[in-house]
Image (tube, grey):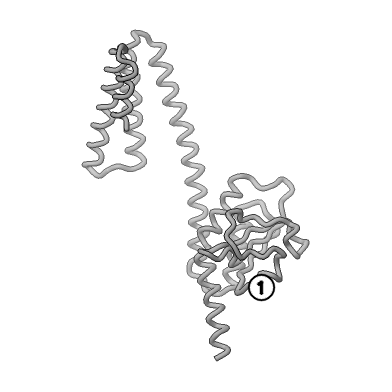
Amino acid sequence: MGYFSLESFNLFFPNLTGLNNFLRVLTYMSLYWGIVFYSLKVYNENVSRFIKFILGFSLVYISLFYYKSLEQPTLVLAIILILDFYNYIFDKIFLRKSYTIEKTFNRLVLIREQKQFEIQLRDEILKNTNLKIVRVKIFKNYEDQDCVIKKNFKTYDSNLFIDKKDIYDSEYTSALRIPFGNNPCIGIVLFKDPENYLGIDEINYLTGTIEKVSNLANSIRLSLIYEELASHE
């Protein structure tokens, strides 16, 4: 991609020979380091950051000779450091969210009993958000669903949130449905909205956790169905 971008730049700006040479050196250096680390099979997050710093300092070094001034190299270096700082912060935020969701999943993965699963998931949500009132319910069939929420989810809907007007129990002000495959609602997480509202990280945790544990919830739901069928035989 870098090579084709460079060739396009040469085509549209043929008179900027010095800048073209500058960009060509940078592109070749990127290709060189990419081939080296791919061949050594040591490409990871730290290596990626190392490569970005090498390319950044190379850009500063080359720009020093191209512009014959310290102003532009200093600006380039400042931009690189600022972008790296923000990239580091965002990586930590998303890593923490993923790590928390993974911990919740690991605590639920071995549970096979419905009530225990519902209680454990509720406790995990209470621990990782500022919610105070939470209830989790796995639906065995549509009749169970109709007893908790007014809206009948029988078709796919990308929005997991359920409004207060669609919840029978007035104690709860919002809910998140648990979908799995073609079934849009195999369970539900009911909660009362906190006074200071949910933060973005808490909303991401809730939706991410529901997506992560939906297969576990479905396994428990199938077990309930099999038990009911076996009892009628």
Q: Position of residue 69 (x, y in %)?
A: 37, 8
Q: Position of residue 62 (x, y in %)?
A: 30, 17
- Where on the picture, by quarter, is residue 191? bottom right
- Where on the picture, by quarter, is residue 149? bottom right
Residue sitting farthest toward the top? 68
Q: Is residue 130 above or below residue 82?
A: below
Quick one: label 1, few (<14), some, or many (20+) residues within 10 Å? Answer: some
Out of 100 and 148, give the one closest to the viewer.
148
Q: Is residue 43 above or below residue 185?
A: above
Q: Residue at x 58, y 73 (%)?
A: 114
Q: Which residue is mark 1?
A: 144
Q: Residue at x 26, y 27 (%)?
A: 29
Position of the C terminus by quadrant = bottom right
Q: Is residue 157 above or below residue 198?
A: below
Out of 220 and 1, give the one closest to the viewer.
1
Q: Residue at x 57, y 49 (%)?
A: 204
Left or right of 11, for residue 75: right
Q: Residue at x 58, y 67 (%)?
A: 186
